[in-house]
Amino acid sequence: MELLKIILEKLIYGGGIVFDLAKWLIVVFVAVMIINTFFISLFFVDGASMEPNLHNREAILWDKNSYHIAAPQRLDVAAVNAPSDPTHKKYVKRVIGLPGDKIEIMSGRVYLNDELLVESYLPSDLETTDEGSWTLGEDQYFVMGDNRPNSNDSRAFGPVDRRFVLGKAISIVFPRFRLIKDI
Amino acid sequence: MAVKGSKRNKRPVVGVYWRKLFFMSGVFAFIFFGLSSVQLFRADAVSTDLGSSGTDYSSSSVKIVDMQIRSDGSIYIDGKKSKTRVTTIGDKEEVRIPIVDNVAKYFSQVKVNVELPKAIANSIGHEEILMHSYGSYMSFSVVDSTHVTFIATDVSQLATVTPVITMPKGTVNPPLLLKIIGYLTQFKGSVWAIVGISIPLATMIFMFLFIGYKIRRTKVDIPKEQSSFPPMALPPALVGVLYHQTVGAREIAATLVDLALRKNIYIMDRERDFAFVKNKFDTRLLSFEKILLSKIFKDNIFSDQKEIEERINNHLYSKKISLVTGGIYVLATRLGYFKVNPQKSHLKYQMIGIFGLFIGVAGFVITLVRFPDPAYISFFWLGMAAACLVIMSLAKKIPIRTPLGQEALSSWLAFRNYLASPDKIPFSLSNQETFQKFLPYAVVLDCEVSWARRFSEHGFEIPGWYMTAETGMGLQEFCLSLYPIVSYVGRSMAAIREPGFK
């Protein structure tokens, strides 16, 4: 009761540690929210579809602002809203096709505008399954996981609109630091 | 009171007390990782356990879902209101809602009967998303002008079935609040950024105008003439609070120099660090001076830099320093220099500022949660919060001196003119005494460097209260040695004052 009285007095008289710490906490909280909402955030990979480049439970730093400034680039590793449930699910996939591209999967390989796409980030013996052909609209991207036999991506849900491509993965920060551009 | 060229390599005081900074960095990291830990981004793999667990065809069934899209944009699934609403995407209105999502049950067929808000079945766009299901198929058909149907077959236990409908803009008429939200989210981020900057800027301009108006109303005569003597016998800290309206590092530093001059303490320059030595117990000490001494020395008569830093660093806030500053404010108010205790006046604006800050931050958080990403409208609330900080910061400059205080300040400003005058004072033993005697006043009146410049360096004799092993120290070396010590202690102590302490 005495403690409550002291705390109330502090609050009523507006001073002291409570308000000053609150002030600092607010500043920190707002700074974190601004950074987290508009600039850089962190997510954890949940699943195996980006193996062998991203592993389950790896922490990834991603730039939320990059695609507001410039369009997604081919081979970017991007955070993508799940077209099936954009409110609740987010994916991490690699951007393969850009607006206007023709993507064809044939004989285990990816053809981009009728030319074989060289994918140095994949194991040499890895084949891309689920044959098909897609021509992207002016605002559409084709995204795939690096673990081609084991990834739900544009082969399953089709090309994604740009509004679903949220931001660019920058680096793995846990358990080992690596820049995404190096993988 | 920063003096360039200090020979000491002191720990930097960056305006933020380092312990608070350290503490808050921890909080920052905690919040940042806390927020991030809930963000799981799926590297969504095709399920490989379908084969092992097997599809339970024995429990296969047909799932029929009735979806109603109402004219206000709300969506009802089997009579229950969904949290998902019709969203506006460019010139379309879209419904995208998962009907089946990893429900651990096989359906031979999932049928979604959709009732549209208007007779537009033949003009809507549609997309069928069926994931995590082998050999399955999803189709769309128009039943009549207000009804359409999606049918998915062989839907596995892990499947996601999402029908997507795009309707012409204006099909639904959302409630006013949602219309306003929709309208506000149309503006670009740059527009909201400008709004966010403009609010504190406008507040700052208003505050400056208001302070200017108040200054004109309670005009302090700024004398042109010089007064070579202090107009009255006042402790330097009180002169400081009369001049600045706040008790800060300068007032504490000046009090230390004043205590040294009165031979209550010695200041020791030990080349690599410094120390204070208690001399005599003076019964004429003012209460805030006694408390300051007890903060520095505790029960000892000697206190070096390490001990003082430990005493400062042991606290996020110091009640003793709060008592020191509170005591100075009370004395200045009792002397009739202020209409109200400046501390109380600061507190009033602090309360207003904190209230506004709270509203701003609450609005910021609500906006981030309720508005679609990226919620640039949150910049408005940030602007409001920043405006409150401007109020809290500038309110200290609003003049609250009484006519007596204005008159007293005017007299002290005449003395300040003397201290800050560029004319050299020839050095003599008597003048050296003058230099020391007025030094604390020069500190609180922001002119200690100008005051030192008035004296030539020749023939300087180190004061008795200042102990150093260095020989042949000139006035400049003395200042370069003393100022950083008292400045450092003053700033460190001012930083641990408990704000609003009564």
Image (tube, rainbow, N blue to C red):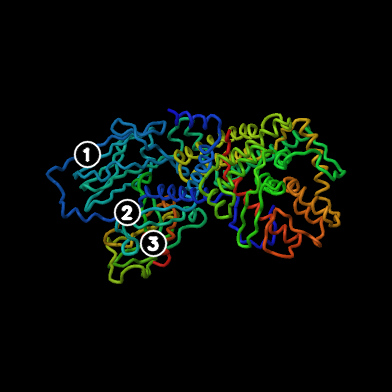
The chain containing the residue under callout 2 comes to: A
Q: Which residue is mark 3?
A: A96
**Rendered location of residue B301, percent (x, y):** 59, 49
Q: Residue at x 65, y 54 (%)?
A: B485
**Rendered location of residue A110, percent (x, y):** 33, 66
User: Do callouts 3 and 1 mark residues in contact (Cβ within 8 Å)?
Assistant: no
User: In this rendering, does residue A100 appear at all?
Assistant: no
User: Do callouts 1 and 2 mark residues in contact (Cβ within 8 Å)?
Assistant: no
B38 left or right of B410 in image: left
From the viewer's perspective, is residue B197 above or below residue B70? below
Q: Residues within 10 Å of mark 2 (few under 14, many from 20)?
A: many
Instruction: State which mark lies toward you, 1 or 2.
Output: 2
Mark 3 is on which residue type?
Ile
Q: Which residue is mark 2?
A: A46
- Marker disc for residue B63: 1
Q: Residues within 10 Å of mark 1 (few under 14, many from 20)?
A: some
The chain containing the residue under callout 1 comes to: B
- Mark 3 or mark 2: name the one nearer the start of the chain: 2
**Rendered location of residue B153, percent (x, y):** 22, 46
Q: On the image, which quarter does residue B143 sit in?
A: top left
- Quarter of the image for the N terminus of chain A: give it: top left
Q: Give the number of marks.
A: 3
B370 left or right of A48 in image: right
Gap between marks 3 and 2 measured at Cα: 21 Å
Q: Which residue is nearer to you in this view: B263 or B51?
A: B263
From the viewer's perspective, is residue A44 above or below residue B397? below
Q: Which residue is nearer to you in this view: B340 or B488?
A: B488
Gap between marks 1 and 2 measured at Cα: 29 Å
Q: Residue furthest right?
A: B225
User: In this rendering, does residue B110 appear at all?
Assistant: yes
